[in-house]
Amino acid sequence: MKLLLDTHILLWAAGHPEKLTDSARSLLTAPENSLFFSAASIWEIVIKIGLGRADFKVDPYRLRKMLVIHGYTELPITSEHALRVETMPLFHKDPFDRILLAQARSEGLLLVTADASIAQHQESVLAV
């Protein structure tokens, strides 16, 4: 499977693996799965660090470097992704979550998340 990881899943995998469910851990370690991270997640982390969010204590440069070293594929944000946001229902208004979901749908990926509001979208989402 091709899996796009939600920002919190990336952060948990990198710094707090004990927060991952067993199913999430299995997905991330299964050799047949291809793991992707979005430029939007790095952007979200940088913004929330700048806002002083305590739950975003990570070096975004090191995180990106380690993701690439460990075989994750970076997914840039394209105008196609931005346009896809328009067609999604408004279960929630978080712009980072919306672009991640749009990327997953556009690229044929499953968005791996533990966020119940994202899981409401169902299409292209894998709730863990």
Image (spheres, rainbow, N blue to C red):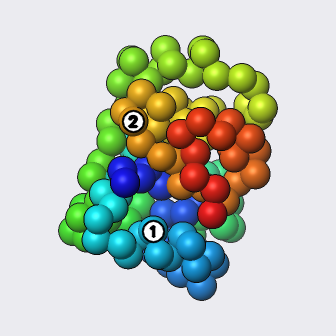
In x, y percent, where is residue 16? 56, 80
The extreme bottom residue here reads 18
Give the quarter of the image for residue 92: top right
Amino acid at circle 2? Gly
Q: Nearer the viewer, residue 94 or 55?
A: 94
Label 1 residue SS: helix
Q: Name the residue rendered at 62%, 76% in the picture.
A: 21
Q: How many marks?
A: 2
Q: CA distance from mark 1 to mark 2?
A: 17 Å
Residue displayed at 36% across by 72% down: 30
Q: Residue 118 shows which numbered tag?
A: none
Provide the residue designation for mark 2: 108
Give coordinates of residue 22: x percent, y percent: 58, 79
Residue 93 locus on image (x, y percent) = 73, 31
**Where is mark 1, residue-wise?**
27
Mark 2 is surrounded, within 10 Å at the Cα level, by few (under 14), some (14 to 19) or many (20 or more) other residues, namely some
**Can residue 83 be seen?**
yes
Q: Is residue 16 visible?
A: no
Q: Nearer the viewer, residue 92 or 60?
A: 92
Dot 1 and dot 2 residues touching (CB under 8 Å): no
Name the element at disc 2: loop
The front one of 11 and 55 is 11
Instruction: Identify the residue at image location x=63%, y=63%.
Output: 128
Residue drawn 68% across the image and 67% down it: 54
Query: At which x and y percent is residue 31?
Result: 28, 71
